Image (tube, rainbow, N blue to C red):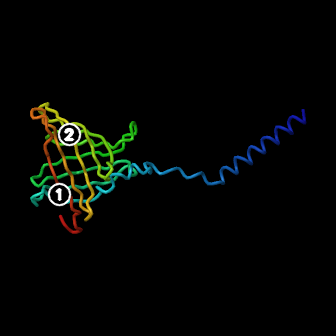
Amino acid sequence: MRRILLTAAASLAASCATAQDAETQPAPAAAAPCSAEIFRHFDFWIGEWEVFTPDGAKAGENIIAPEEYGCLLVERWTSANGTTGQSYNFVDLADNKWRQVWVSSWGTIDYVGGLNEDGAMVLEGKIAYPNGNTAPFSGTWSLNDDGTVTQHFRQFNAETEEWADWFIGTYRKKQSGED
């Protein structure tokens, strides 16, 4: 019996020593959330922007900010006439594609995609209006050499069976001190 107790005590002491060693050793560093390269693909859009139409008129202002440890980009848009909208932009973990869900008083857009061979973000899906109409919709964001970003939206017209420009805007970084 004494031998069994001594063996059990030795085993318990060895377990305690192993547990103490584990407590004093630093735990391996866990990977930061959303640290994979795919989560950085849309980072070129992050910032505070003024947005201009092709004829140079100011279309509005947009703030794109990373949230949730870089797992989410939140867009807050204000047009030149005061209308607003917001979007959530994220990598859909179900299919590893970027997804944007846009919500405003005039409708919603839900589309998915990723970077094309030129490094532009291309999303495709549908737009829906309050009257119940929907249409295929696409958006492309391209980083330009001068640091601006071109945003090009297109909507499919079922009557003409053609794609038409819906919006084209050039994003210019807002200078500090501007309102």
The label on residue 137 is 2
Q: Quadrant of residue 147?
A: bottom left
Q: Which residue is mark 1?
A: 51
Residue type of the residue flagged with mark 1? Val
Residue at x 11% of width, y 55% of height: 80
64 sits to left or right of 36: left
35 sits to left or right of 158: right
Judged from the image, the secondary structure of the residue bearing numbered disc 1 is: strand
Disc 2, disc 1: CB below 8 Å?
Answer: no
Q: From the viewer's perspective, is residue 147 above or below residue 156?
A: below
Could you say which is closer to the camera, residue 17 or residue 144? Answer: 144
In the image, farthest residue toward the right? 2
Residue at x 32% of width, y 48% of height: 116
In the image, farthest residue toward the top? 132
Percent from the top left, x then y, of residue 19?
70, 46
Give the position of the N terminus as an image quadrant. top right
Residue at x 16% of width, y 52% of height: 168
Percent from the top left, x then y, of residue 138?
22, 42
